[in-house]
Image (cartoon, rainbow, N blue to C red):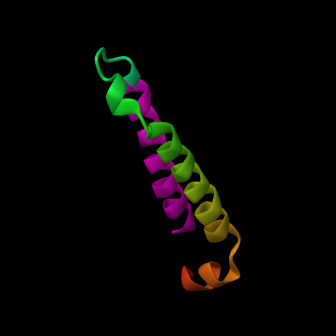
Amino acid sequence: MLRLMAILFGSGLLTSIIDYVLLLNIPLTGPMTEGTIPELVRMAVYFVIWGTYFMRSKRVANTFVR
């Protein structure tokens, strides 16, 4: 279950990065990309904090027992 949470957080971040890269390749979408980099940074920080918590926390490990 812990790996599933890490995959969930990571896939959200990866999807956003791919979306941003594809958006940059479309002409006339310059104004749409404003503010996207801070949003990606926020998502990366979110992923690092919560991913670390889910992987290291004893409380989480005790919650998701088999």
* Percent of width and height locating residue 24: 40, 22
Residue occupying the point 59% across, 65% down: 50
Where is residue 25, by image quadrant? top left
Residue 66 visible in the current orientation: no
Where is residue 27, by image quadrant? top left
Q: Is residue 61 above or below residue 21?
A: below
Please name whichever residue, 45 or 7, is drawn nearer the observer in this view of the structure.
45
* Percent of width and height locating residue 60: 60, 79
Q: Is residue 38 above or below residue 60?
A: above
Lateral position of residue 3 relative to residue 21, left or right: right
Lateral position of residue 20 relative to residue 50, left or right: left
Look at the magenta stretch and give its main secondary structure: helix
Residue furthest top as drawn: 27
Residue occupying the point 65% across, 70% down: 53
* Percent of width and height locating residue 59: 64, 84
Residue occupying the point 62% across, 85% down: 62
Q: Is residue 3 above or below residue 23?
A: below
* Percent of width and height locating residue 55: 66, 67
Lateral position of residue 5 relative to residue 30, left or right: right
Residue occupying the point 56% across, 67% down: 2
The mark tally for this picture is: 0
Lateral position of residue 58 relative to residue 7, left or right: right
The quarter of the rendered structure image containing the C terminus is bottom right
Please name whichever residue, 64 or 9, is drawn nearer the observer in this view of the structure.
9
10 in magenta: yes
18 in magenta: yes
Residue 36 visible in the current orientation: yes
- Residue range in magenta is 1-23
Q: Is residue 42 above or below residue 64?
A: above
